[in-house]
Amino acid sequence: MLDPFKKAIDLLEPLPLDEGPDKVMTMPAAIKRFVKPGMTLHLVTTHNRPGCAVVELIREFKGKKPGFTFSCIGFVSNGVALVHAGLAKKLIATFCGDSYPTPGPNPVITRAWKSGEIEIENWSILALPMRLLAAAMGLPFLPCKSITGSTMATDNQRDYFETDDGHGGVIGMVRPLAPDLAFVHAPYADKSGNVIMTPPYGEDALGALAAKDGVIVSVEKVVSSEFVRRYSHLCKVPSYKVVAVCEVPFGAHPGGVSNRGLPEFEAYADDYDFVQDIRKASKTRESMDQWVKDWIDDCPTWESYLEKLGKDRIWSLKGKADPDSWKSELLTLSPDLPTGPEYSPVEMMVVAAGRVLAERMKEQGLLTILAGVGASNLAAWLGYYRLKQEGYDVDLMAEIGLYGYAPRPADPFIFNYRNMPTAKMLTGIPSIMGVFMGGADNRCIGSIGAGQVDQHGNVNSTLIPGKAYLTGSGGANDICSAAREVLVTALSGRDRFVEKLPYLTSPGHNVRAVVSDVGVMRKPEGSDELILTDYFAEPGISKEDSLKKIKAQCGWDLKFAPAPIAVEAPSLDELKLLRIFDPRRQFLGKR
């Protein structure tokens, strides 16, 4: 019956195993061909980063002063080497500094910023992807709840403005950011550049879609078009946007790549030791020069780079990506874990913050927690398990795209690979930060840290003009701007608890409590000023002397509640849970 249509049907099947132009080339060849001095280059951030592209860019342009503008969610790890090697004149980012094991300023960034070698344009972790989305969609601007009321709004007037929201208020608008080229690393792509990516998706590859001149893709392996069709639900970048496909095994290093939804792929975890080595090397120009020599100059090819890493290290990172690898790691570390009831001020702070967070969630009927990095994250984890024990329904979220995850022990880093398989949903920043945390129906409490905080709960995590570049907003501004309410965890001190912020990263109107290593401050109903409501008692020190000591550590005239309450000491169960989350005491510090 179909004989008359045979010729037409023959055009339709079988589908070709491979189709499209062949764009496969080496990474050095792609950079030589497509990257030109003065370009704006975007490093796409999902849960992994194009580490191999950073190495090859430095190898090609070191000493040539190419004057690149780099955009990225965060310049961390080997990304700071782009600045040290003199490739960057400007960074457009949400975070510039060290993120592991604890967030903090990076000396390479600080030196270049203070000397005027680089300019840093600061955005939040939601606002920057919104700018990329506007460019990808060809729009002149997009609305965004973030940035309003911060110093970023003032500094970025060329690309940000406010207008009437139609309901008697104002709404912020971000203008598009269209880089010239984007770099992506992913597990697989076919020869023409259809790119398979695994979640969580971070910026959701929006930088690739926004790039004017195309995308240079590095992949673990080039596969057939038939393979891409099999996993079309994981294809995030279409071939028409791609100018080069480069097969670079282990190309996310020192980051990792997950295999969520892609069981054929052998995942590998972040190389924490390598990241810490870069952090140490960053302290001086000389030690950073040596790092560049060791890992770039003396490794003329990516193959030689991997050879220097060594097979044992590579196999170890693959093992650490296993969801259950925390068990053996915790077993190894357990002999050094303290088991007694003695606790440090930081442990007291984290336990108290977890209690306050759980208390506020129950009082306000909140259902989700969005936490930052560091002590604020540990507090969120403690609060989460406290609520779970009480039968309260709660879900944890992480900004790069984890929803409903259950934190695993042995590694306190929020984005560690053992947490991913526990998530109920793996998505990206626009969904987590724009909808689940900051949307109209959100039921979210945010838990963030702070470099500095004032009496109104306003936060600075970006910079102290002329003195220090801290790290930037990350997701803090988005959380403070849009979550139902916010809890801040911060170490005390007159240089941290200040009367006037030198830079306002995150507005404090949604901040309801601040927990420090000396006590808890809250905003009374109807007030926008924090007062001390709870204090941490010290053995042998009277209540009166404790309160005087706390007041002396605050940079503003701290007011007290009528009857400040001494916080109950951590229980042994609370301490044990906290200690298995951070067995190396990366966030908890020395006892």
Image (spheres, rainbow, N blue to C red):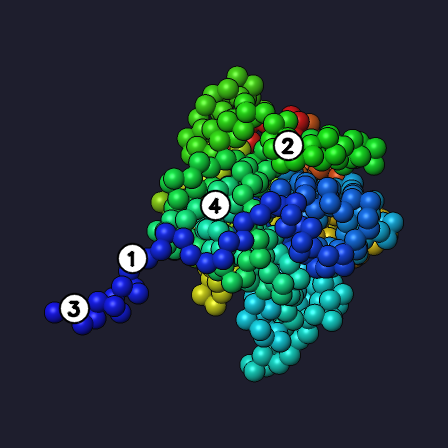
Q: Earlier in the sequence, mark 4 or mark 1?
A: 1
**Foreground label between 2 and 3:** 3
Q: Position of residue 343 (x, y in %)?
A: 60, 28
CA–CA distance in space, label 4 to label 1: 22 Å
Residue at the (29%, 57%) spot, across then down: 14
In the image, is 526 to the left or to the right of 224?
right
Q: Quadrant of the N terminus?
A: bottom left
**Earlier-in-chain disc, 3 versus 1:** 3
Q: Which is in the foreground here, disc 4 or disc 2? A: 4
Q: Badge 3 local density, few (<14 within 10 Å), some, or many (20+)?
A: few
What's the mark number on residue 222? 4
Are discs 3 and 4 less than 8 Å apart at CB?
no
Q: Disc 2 marks which residue?
A: 305
The mark that comes first in sequence, 4 or 2, is 4
Q: Nearer the viewer, residue 190 or 146?
A: 190
Task: Name the amino acid, label 2.
Answer: Tyr
**Where is residue 349 shown, x and y percent of the image?**
61, 38
Residue 466, position in %: x, y? 86, 52
Seen in the image, is 376 located left or right of residue 63? left
Cα gap from disc 4 to disc 2, whole angstroms? 20 Å
Element at label 4? strand
The amino acid type, in three-letter code, at marker 4 is Val
